[in-house]
Image (cartoon, rainbow, N blue to C red):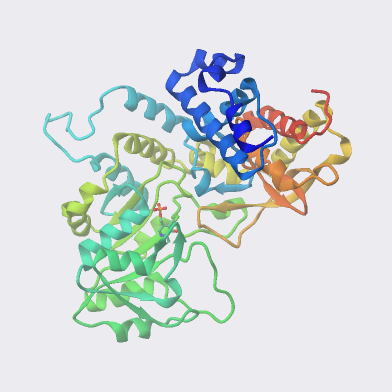
Amino acid sequence: MDKQTLLSQLPAVNEVLRTKTAQRLLNELPRTIVTEAIRITLDKIRQRILKGDGAEVPSPEQVAQQAASVLWREVIPLMPRVINATGIIVHTGLGRSLLSQKAVQRLIEVATHPCALEVDEVTGERSFRDLRVEKLLRLLTGAEAATVVNNNAAAVLLILNTLAEGREVIVSRGELVEIGGSFRIPEILRKSGAILVEVGTTNKTRLSDYERAISERTALLLKVHQSNFRIIGFTEQVSLEDLVALGRKYNLPVVEDLGSGALADVSKAGIEKEPMVQESVKAGADLVSFSGDKLLGGPQAGIVVGRKDLISQLRRNPLYRAFRCDKLTFAALEATLLSYFDEEQAWDEIPTLQQIASSEREIKRRAQKVSRLLLGFGLPKEAISILPSTSQVGGGALPDQFLPTWCIVVKPKEGDNPDNFAKRLRLGNPSVFCRIQKDALWFDLRTVLPDELNELTECIAKAWVEMGGRTSL
Ligand SMILES: *Cc1c(COP(=O)(O)O)cnc(C)c1O
């Protein structure tokens, strides 16, 4: 059949709307959305025919079925819920930290009721939204003052713009990092209006390098946590203590971008220690900034703690208003911080810390359960194994630290592409993200929540069937 004949036989939008599948969609969704999905689908089919790829004209019902998947992916692409089986605990692509139950309760309360966000309930007068959380942060970190903005990138930009616009900031060449998502220290510095003065070399920077670079144009000394990479071997960086001593000598503030920053000591979980905020404050840093949703395990936020006069200057910068957080962030952050007053409680209540601390035994138990359930679904024994592997903290923290873990490993049928299998899993509901290694799919049970094990199993079994595999489904 020639292209024109094929095109003329394509069903009209109205015909597709009358099919069973389209009627089912119309029961749940507005007509405009369903019609748009059908229009896009017919367009795609038309393009295929014109390219010579379409030998047959689909029936109205077939068009409707294609439109159903187009609808969720292209017309109303709501972000899917995900089961994180990657083993990366703080996964930026998957939304970083999960909130504690207490934080969620506070969120709901504050989202569904007014709250005294910017008024003082004692005087009834206008107040500042960060004063309450500041009290918590002062107690937890030992700092004089604190404030919170939208994320740590904004915090760093705000600090540099407030304290160093038009002046020089001294940074070690070993700390000129790119965090990902176009956050590069040299570029942020430039955007802030500050002038970067690089000192030392990639692997070695000494205190004398900083000292030689100090002039009347210097505004501050900046220390950046290397976060997502490590320089090993012949290396030297200046400690915060030494930098603080130098800053005092020349009356220059020392600012530390801690990156993740932790309030609890993660070395308790058997990995290397991540720098703690309290220790930077104690070492005398004038300002310390860190993320709310990395190791802290709270909502997205950029937290700054340090000297009272400097925090006041940050608050007076017009950018502060542009970077301010909403009441939901404050509510979740308050509740998260509250857990840290008793460190045991923090490890118990905060999901990010729970996942770091999960024991191998508990993780293996989850893997055994999933394996049992998969066999129950009729997946062949030889396709499934339970193997040891390693998880990562993620979020740019501790890149060289690996937590021992257990995975369910599913080997696709002979000749099947593991990438296709993984794609089907990602397109499921909920969507499942895992690792591909040695032509198999690895599901790390450390980052899968205990109440997701049944769902995970069903998703794997469903994708197995879609790949043409046999089960007892
Ligand atoms: C992650 C990170 C940032 C950015 O923090 P966000 O909260 O993601 O904006 C900045 N600096 C360092 C060193 C980081 O690790």
Viewer-proximal residue among 194 and 115: 194
Q: Is residue 78 visible?
A: no
Q: Number of callouts in the render?
A: 0
Q: Residue at x 32, y 72 (%)?
A: 244
Residue 304 location, x and y as percent? 31, 54
Query: Quadrant location of the N terminus?
Result: top right
Q: Quadrant of residue 199?
A: bottom left
Q: Residue at x 58, y 28 (%)?
A: 8
- Residue 250 vs residue 337: left or right? left
Residue 302 location, x and y as percent? 35, 50
- Residue 144 vs residue 233: left or right? left
Q: Residue at x 86, y 45 (%)?
A: 414
Viewer-proximal residue among 142 and 276: 276
Q: Residue at x 48, y 30 (%)?
A: 101
Please say if 331 is above or below 300.
above
Residue 338 location, x and y as percent? 39, 38
Q: Quadrant of residue 232?
A: bottom right
Please say if 180 is above or below 424.
below
Q: Quadrant of ligand 1?
A: bottom left
- Residue 378 vs residue 443: left or right? right
Viewer-proximal residue among 238 and 78: 78
Residue 363 location, x and y as percent? 70, 40
- Residue 404 vs residue 191: left or right? right
